[in-house]
Amino acid sequence: MEYVLRGASALKTLRETRLSALKGPGEFFDYHRISRPADMNEATSRISYNTRYFSGNYLLIILGLAIYAIITKPILLIAIFFLVGGFAAINRLAPESIQVGNQTITQSTLYIALFVIGLPLLMWASPVWTFFWLLGSSAFIILFHAALMEPGIESEYANMPDNTNV
């Protein structure tokens, strides 16, 4: 129960911090603001500003690519469900030894069987390749968008001191 509450609070924090900064599609795909940066300094400046400004949108891109990767590799999804579901089932259904005929099956025996079957299945699903594909494709899309998108007029006022106390 504690894990569920901790996960729910982490999800709430994620929603409040990252997804509250979500920009609309009109602003994210504003083709009037797309231009080639003049030099590497300008590209770096744009990437720095846009990754903060569009952080919620970029998080959605990463989540979308992760869902796509899992949908296109169903064996990976099966392997993850098998390992996570098996772990949960062993914890819930067999906390103590089970007597089957002359054999006593312990919880550690069930874990060994789960990993002997689950880990080769997981390795066959190539999670490392999927992780690096996700990392590379999301980095390419995010950096490409952030470098080409000119910062809005609000970026000029972001670094100015607050003079409301004058």
Image (spheres, grey):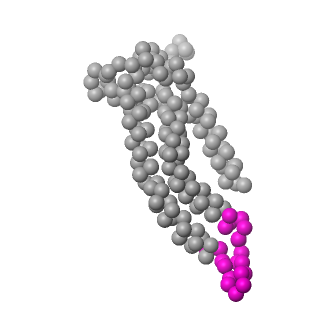
Q: Position of residue 23 (x, y in %)?
A: 54, 24
Q: Quadrant of residue 79?
A: bottom right
Vertical position of residue 43 compared to residue 65: above or below: above
Regarding residue 51, the answer to whether it shows in the image is yes
Q: Which residue: 70% across, 87% down?
A: 102
Q: Is residue 98 left or right of residue 157?
A: right
Q: Which residue: 62% across, 73% down?
A: 110
Instruction: Looking at this view, name the residue that lies furthest to the top.
Output: 166
Q: Which residue: 46% across, 54% down?
A: 127
Regarding residue 160, the answer to whether it shows in the image is no
Q: Is residue 55 left or right of residue 20?
A: left
Q: Position of residue 122 (x, y in %)?
A: 50, 60
Front-most of 48 and 96?
96
Instruction: Looking at this view, name the residue that lies furthest to the left.
Output: 39
> What is the span of residues highlighted in magenta in the rendered image?
89-108
Residue 97 is covered by the magenta coloring: yes
Vertical position of residue 131 compared to residue 14: above or below: below
Vertical position of residue 15 compared to residue 84: above or below: above
Q: Position of residue 77 (x, y in %)?
A: 55, 52
Total numbered circles:
0
Q: Which residue: 71% across, 65% down?
A: 92
Q: Position of residue 67 (x, y in %)?
A: 54, 42
Vertical position of residue 158 compared to residue 166: above or below: below
Front-most of 144 and 50?
144
Quadrant, the N terminus? bottom right
Residue 14 is covered by the magenta coloring: no
